[in-house]
Image (tube, rainbow, N blue to C red):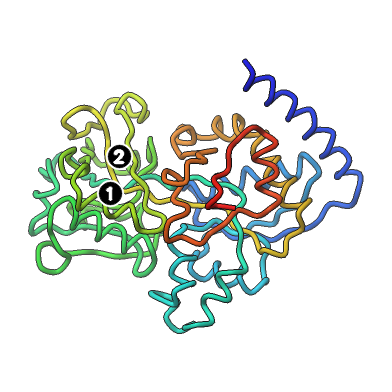
């Protein structure tokens, strides 16, 4: 009851504050996100809608972006906001992976970004048509598996998820296929691959697209492997989070089944944040975050998978923050979360 009262009072103050802000000319903000159909696209498009309705800002979103490039664009101050997997700011800070050319300059650029709010883009699962006879991760031996785009965090994590669950390496044990996300819809139904390992939401449009070609089977990471010391170590890496979802909460109907010992999907989850430039004003960052918080129920109602994407998950371990990750919340965002009754971990401030 106290939580409901706090939220009610917060909403009143939010409305009053936004009414005052909307009396001024709205600011125009630019943002990047990934392709339509996924969590990063849904969250930022929702934000664009509600910011406009509340009179906070006009958010112009460019979709279908490679977020590796978007991070550089944001860090250089050329856009105001971007969806972002937490692993990428870490790699930029260290000058590794796709940011190896940045060297020591990477740390300076990574220091230019701040988070507004967390969410996740689902968990890496193996799925295939029932006709492919893939009933365990070991069954991908000798098979052709789509595991992501040609470059980026998704491919790295998919390969990692496969090694952890099966011990298999691409090239040695199975044939990996990569293509841009825009090509995935065709790949799911054209018979060119035996199985797919990509991030899944719950439910996932990727599974339902494949279902048009026949019944689909999702294979969870075995419980004993998921709980092993080796698998748990992967969650020490920035942006990797443990994801567990009960079958009854996954939102599937006839034509989709799951292989799991206890009806729970387990997998390597990918933590995301909405990033802004550090120079965004305190008041604007607070107003944007407050609008997000006040409209969480509306966001959850926009897609069947939205209740399962870790919205308002402020536990840093489950949000992928702290530890080796240097991503911090913007001071304005911290104020908004705390005024709404949430606890922001000191390590994320």
Q: Which residue is mark 1?
A: 189
The answer to whether 169 is drawn above or below residue 189 in the figure is below
Depth order, front residue of 213/288 = 288
Q: Residue furthest front?
A: 346
Upstream in sequence: badge 1 or badge 2: 1
Depth order, front residue of 145/138 = 138
Relative image position of residue 14 (x, y in whole percent): 77, 35
**Picture residue at 15% right of the left edge, 40% below the top:** 224
Task: Classify mark 2: residues with Cα within 10 Å, few (<14), some (14-19) or many (20+).
Answer: few
Q: Residue furthest right?
A: 23
**Picture residue at 35% right of the left edge, 49% below the top:** 199
Depth order, front residue of 41/287 = 287
How far apart in space, not on screen, are marks 1 and 2 (Cα)? Answer: 7 Å
Which quadrant would residue 245 be assigned to in this image? top left
**Picture residue at 79% right of the left edge, 27% below the top:** 12
Residue contact between numbered discs 1 and 2, judged by CB atoms under 8 Å: yes
The answer to whether 21 is drawn above or below residue 63 in the figure is above
Relative image position of residue 7 (x, y in whole percent): 68, 26
Relative image position of residue 342 (x, y in whole percent): 60, 35
Which quadrant would residue 182 be assigned to in this image? bottom left
Task: Classify mark 1: residues with Cα within 10 Å, few (<14), some (14-19) or many (20+).
Answer: some
Secondary structure of the residue carrying numbered label 2: loop
- Numbered tag placed on residue 212 in the rendering: 2
């Amino acid at each position: 009851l106290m939580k409901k009262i706090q939220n009610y009072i917060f909403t009143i103050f939010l409305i009053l504050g936004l009414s005052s802000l909307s009396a001024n000319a709205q600011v125009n903000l630019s943002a990047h996100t990934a392709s339509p159909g996924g969590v990063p696209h849904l969250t930022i498009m929702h934000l664009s809608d509600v910011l406009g309705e509340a009179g906070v800002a006009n958010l112009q979103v460019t979709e279908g972006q490679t977020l590796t490039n978007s991070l550089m664009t944001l860090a250089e101050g050329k856009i105001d906001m971007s969806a972002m997997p937490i692993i990428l700011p870490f790699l930029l800070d260290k000058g590794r992976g796709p940011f190896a050319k940045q060297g020591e300059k990477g740390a300076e650029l990574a220091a230019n970004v701040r988070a507004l709010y967390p969410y996740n883009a689902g968990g890496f699962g193996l799925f295939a048509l029932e006709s492919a006879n893939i009933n365990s991760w070991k069954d991908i031996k000798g098979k052709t598996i789509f595991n992501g785009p040609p470059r980026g965090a998704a491919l790295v994590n998919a390969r990692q998820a496969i090694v952890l669950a099966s011990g298999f390496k691409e090239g040695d044990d199975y044939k990996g296929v990569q293509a841009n996300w825009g090509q995935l819809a065709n790949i799911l139904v054209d018979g060119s691959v035996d199985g797919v390992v990509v991030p899944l939401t719950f439910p996932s449009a990727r599974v339902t697209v494949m279902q048009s070609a026949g019944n689909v089977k999702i294979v969870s990471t075995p419980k004993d492997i998921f709980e092993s010391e080796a698998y748990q170590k992967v969650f020490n890496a920035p942006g990797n989070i443990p994801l567990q979802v009960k079958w009854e909460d996954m939102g599937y109907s006839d034509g989709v089944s799951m292989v799991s010992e206890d009806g729970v999907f387990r997998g390597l989850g990918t933590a995301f944040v909405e990033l802004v430039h550090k120079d965004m004003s305190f008041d604007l960052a607070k107003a944007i975050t407050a609008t997000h918080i006040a409209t969480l129920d509306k966001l959850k109602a926009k897609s069947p998978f939205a209740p399962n994407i870790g919205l308002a998950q402020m536990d840093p371990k489950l949000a992928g923050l702290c530890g080796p990750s240097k991503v911090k919340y913007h001071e304005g965002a911290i104020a908004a979360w705390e005024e709404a009754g949430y606890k922001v971990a000191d390590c994320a401030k």
